[in-house]
Amino acid sequence: MRHESQLPGDRGWLPTTFRVPTSSFLCEVSTLKEILLHPQASPKFYSPKEVFFCPEESQFYARCLESLVLKNCLSSERVVEFGCGDGSPVITALLRTPFDSIINGYELNPSSCQVAKARVEQYGLSGKYVIHNSSFFEASNSEAAYLIANPPYLPAPDNDILMPLLHGGADGAALTKRLLGLGYENALLMISSYSNPVDTIHYAIAQGYGVADFMVVPLKFGYYSSEPKVENSILELRKHRKAFYSDKVYFLAGVLFKQQQEALLDLSSELIQVMTAL
Ligand SMILES: C[S@@+](CC[C@H](N)C(=O)[O-])C[C@H]1O[C@@H](n2cnc3c(N)ncnc32)[C@H](O)[C@@H]1O
């Protein structure tokens, strides 16, 4: 059982491999070049129990942000983020796009917030990415045109798991649905094929959304999803056709939901086909 990855350390982003002997799956990190920011960006060493760390997932979220949101955003359109983590996805996407507005990011975990704020400052992005150490749900951001999030989606009966802030309710979709219920005009959300995806997409449609675009990547089960309590929940969901995966991978989709207008090309059927393919 192992998880191989790289961590930000007190000597910076260490190119050393570490192994956490708690997972029966291997979370492979093929390339970290795009997500590893400057060595001095991390003020302190944090373990993956303290700060969310899954580079493949965060890197894919960054790509979705770049292609589905930031490239198309007008300078008048504000963006609000639920759960910045260590800040690397938004920073990476900002460094690749001429985005000219402001992203307000909310992160409950103080350690993640500390890392994210240090990085934002280091990259000179304080004018574009403002991070708040508070719950997203306590803030009022109704004027934002886009909601963006890689939300917690781990299914488990309760939040007594390795990282409680990654708990997505019994089926993993509770936080995602809560975000979809807030009425933002556009929402870019990461959706996992093992967290009741069909129900989530139907819920979005019931809230007036269509699927304007999406991107999908296969991911191996990793450190957080291989915790026995989470793994058992995923197995149980699969029996009820609420989780879809092979013995090797699951799918993670970056989905751009848009409030339905007459001319919207709605790709929800196509998204459901992809998410249930395994
Ligand atoms: C799956 S992680 C994603 C982190 C980062 N966006 C990424 O993709 O690398 C979800 C993040 O949401 C944060 N979070 C959970 N509940 C929150 C809340 N109510 N308000 C703000 N952040 C929250 C967690 O602490 C965690 O850092």
Image (cartoon, rainbow, N blue to C red):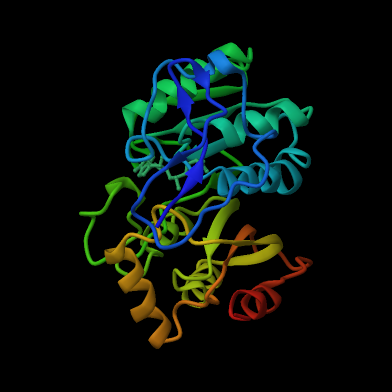
Which residue: 66% across, 47% down? 30
Say which quadrant the C terminus sits in. Answer: bottom right
**Is 246 left or right of 114, judged from the image as shown?**
right
Quadrant in the picture for residue 276: bottom right
Which residue: 57% across, 24% down? 129
Q: Please, is residue 85 above or below residue 183 in the view?
A: above
Nearer to me, 213 or 238: 238
Visible residue check, residue 143: no
Which of the four quarters of the rendered structure image does ligand 1 lie in? top left
**Is 178 left or right of 202, judged from the image as shown?**
left
* Spot occupied by residue 98 in the image (x, y as percentages of width and height): 79, 27
Visible residue check, residue 157: yes
- Callout count: 0
Q: Please, is residue 120 above or below residue 83 in the view?
A: above
Say which quadrant the N terminus sits in. Answer: bottom left
**Is 262 left or right of 188, judged from the image as shown?**
right
Nearer to me, 194 or 29: 29
Which residue: 63% across, 59% down? 255
* Spot occupied by residue 35 in the image (x, y as percentages of width and height): 63, 34
